[in-house]
């Protein structure tokens, strides 16, 4: 049998994002970072934090505490990992949920502006700042962005006018501007919380997990949900 080299084996990788990236390890539900990192004997770190936003200066309403800002955590990542083989980023869901009523914080995209002077308190500016810093800090690393799977059960479906999809489509635009490869799980993964095969709203999160469904609550994933997505992400990472 022909030997095929695994490009991920033994490499150094950092993941960052929101709760989808973080997973629920305390409940035994491991996210793609853990699964891919361990399977391929990688040196890995997952910086993902539940409730995180790509956009900076977004706060927890009940406490006033700052959220995990992916656009600024890149500085901490670079300080702790000056050299990387892979940097895999994710986010946008909480930005959409929290900023949808503040249209001025969506931001404008200038395809010709590569100055690095971006307003990271807007979603577009935060994406720009994130990719500018990522490519500056890690010019030799393989950098990629994950667009999350379908979430929620919107009455109008999952088209471009759905608030989360609107933010994800902007993230894709910024990826294209900066030449950042992305995987659009919204489009290429079969998961859909409107289909009972993947999520049963009559069941609790634990019952959905036990039944082998893909969603705990129509947004966050079960063990099986992560397995479906991890296989796709791992294959995509091997092409970077």
Image (cartoon, rainbow, N blue to C red):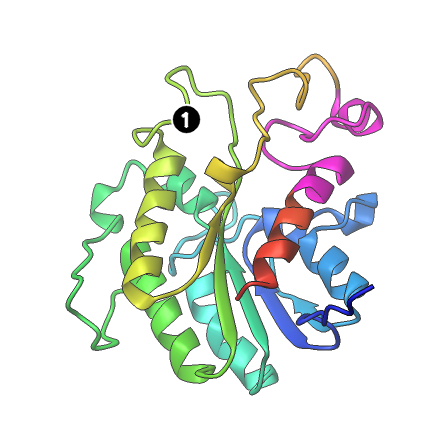
Q: Which residue lies furthest to the top in this view?
A: 202
Report if residue 121 is visible in the image: no
Establish if 88 lies above or below 203: below
Q: Is residue 76 left or right of residue 201?
A: left
Q: Residue furthest front?
A: 1
Residue at figure coordinates x 51%, y 43% from the top left: 62
Q: In this view, does 38 lie to the left or right of 168?
A: right
Neighbours of disc 1 within 10 Å: few (<14), some (14-19), many (20+):
some
Q: Give the range drawn in magenta.
A: 204-228
Question: Could you say which quadrant of the image residue 167 lies in?
Answer: top left
Question: Could you say which quadrant of the image residue 4 lies in?
Answer: bottom right
* Residue under label 1: 158
> Picture coordinates of residue 231 (x, y %)?
68, 48
Residue at figure coordinates x 81%, y 49% from the top left: 26
* Magenta stretch holds residue 143: no
Establish if 65 lies above or below 28: below
């Amino acid at each position: 049998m022909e030997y095929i080299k695994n490009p991920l084996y033994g490499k150094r990788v950092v993941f960052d994002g929101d709760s989808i990236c973080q997973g629920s390890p305390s409940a035994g539900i491991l996210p793609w970072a853990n699964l891919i990192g361990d399977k391929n004997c990688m040196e890995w770190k997952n910086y993902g934090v539940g409730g995180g936003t790509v956009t900076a200066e977004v706060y927890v309403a009940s406490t006033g505490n700052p959220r995990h800002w992916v656009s600024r955590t890149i500085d901490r990542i670079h300080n702790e990992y000056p050299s990387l083989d892979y940097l895999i980023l994710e986010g946008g869901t909480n930005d959409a949920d929290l900023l949808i009523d503040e249209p001025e914080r969506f931001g404008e995209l200038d395809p010709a502006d590569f100055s690095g002077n971006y307003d990271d308190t807007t979603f577009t500016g935060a994406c720009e700042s994130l990719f500018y810093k990522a490519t500056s800090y890690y010019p030799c690393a393989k950098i990629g962005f994950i667009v999350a799977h379908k979430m929620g059960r919107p009455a109008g479906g999952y088209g471009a006018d759905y608030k989360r999809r609107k933010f994800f489509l902007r993230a894709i635009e910024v990826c294209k501007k900066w030449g950042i490869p992305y995987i659009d799980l919204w489009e290429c993964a079969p998961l859909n919380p409107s289909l009972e095969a993947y999520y049963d709203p009559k069941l609790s999160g634990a019952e959905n997990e036990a039944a082998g469904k893909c969603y705990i609550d129509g947004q966050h994933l079960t063990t099986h949900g992560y397995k479906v997505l991890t296989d796709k992400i791992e294959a995509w990472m091997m092409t970077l």
